[in-house]
Image (tube, rainbow, N blue to C red):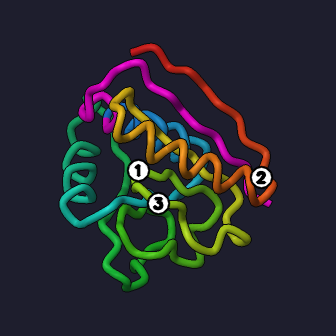
C-alpha cells in the first residue's frame, strides 16, 4: 500500500509550488529515486520541465516530458499528464488535480498543495479519497 504525504505550503504562489516541487525532485534524484511527476496537462509539464533546468545554479537533474514512449534511459525523472509508466511507480509527485491511477502499484505519492483555495479544495478531495481507501497519510506544513 502506498505511503502518501501531503506538503501544505504557506504560500499561495503557483511559482513557489513549482519551486518546492523541483526541490523535492532534486532530493529524490540524489537518493537515486527516479520519480514520475504527474501534471494536469502538457502546459504544466512544460513549465516544470523548463524550471528544472534553471531553479538552482549548478544543479543537474536528468528529466524529460513523458509522451507515452519509454525513454531510452531509465535513470531519468519523467514529467507528464499520462498514467504513470511501469518503471516509474516507486514515487509519484502529484501536481495534478486528480489521484494517480493504479494506486496498488505505486509505493510513494507526494501531494504538493499551495495555499490557494481551489488547490486546497482539490487536495482535500484527494485526501478523502485516499483515506476512504485506507491509506496512511502524513501531512507536512511547509513555510515559504
The residue indicated by pointer 1 is: 95
Query: Disc 2 or disc 1, which is closer to the eye?
Result: 2
Residue at 38% from the left image edge and 26% from the top image edge: 115
Mark 1 and mark 3 in contact (Cβ < 8 Å)? Answer: no
- What's the magenta region? 1-18
Query: Disc 3 or disc 1, which is closer to the eye?
Result: 3
- The answer to whether 84 is drawn above or below residue 12 in the figure is below
- Does residue 135 appear left or right of residue 66 in this picture? right
Which of marks 1 and 2 precedes in the sequence?
A: 1
Between the C-alphas of marks 2 and 1, the distance is 19 Å
In the picture, residue 23 is in which quadrant? top left
- The answer to whether 34 is drawn above or below residue 67 in the figure is above
Observer-nearest of 136 and 118: 118
Q: Quadrant of the N terminus?
A: bottom right
Image position, residue 19 (x, y; %)? 32, 33
For this orientation, the residue located farthest to the top is: 143
Image position, residue 82 (x, y; %)? 40, 75
Q: Quadrant of the C terminus?
A: top left
Between the C-alphas of marks 2 and 3, the distance is 16 Å
- Does residue 62 appear left or right of residue 2 in this picture? left
Observer-nearest of 57 and 3: 3
User: What is the number of callouts on the image?
Assistant: 3
Image position, residue 119 (x, y; %)? 38, 40
Amino acid at each position: 500500500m502506498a505511503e502518501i504525504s501531503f506538503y501544505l505550503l504557506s504560500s499561495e504562489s503557483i511559482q513557489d509550488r513549482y519551486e518546492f516541487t523541483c526541490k523535492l525532485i532534486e532530493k529524490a534524484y540524489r537518493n537515486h529515486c527516479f520519480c514520475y511527476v504527474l501534471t494536469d496537462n502538457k502546459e504544466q509539464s512544460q513549465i516544470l520541465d523548463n524550471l528544472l533546468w534553471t531553479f538552482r545554479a549548478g544543479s543537474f537533474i536528468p528529466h524529460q516530458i513523458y509522451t507515452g514512449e519509454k525513454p531510452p534511459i531509465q535513470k531519468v525523472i519523467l514529467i507528464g499528464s499520462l498514467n504513470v509508466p511501469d518503471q516509474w511507480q516507486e514515487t509519484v509527485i502529484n501536481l495534478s488535480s486528480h489521484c494517480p491511477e493504479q494506486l496498488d502499484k505505486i509505493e510513494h505519492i507526494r501531494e504538493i498543495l499551495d495555499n490557494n483555495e481551489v488547490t486546497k479544495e482539490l487536495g482535500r478531495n484527494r485526501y478523502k479519497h485516499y483515506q476512504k481507501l485506507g491509506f496512511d497519510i502524513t501531512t507536512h506544513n511547509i513555510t515559504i
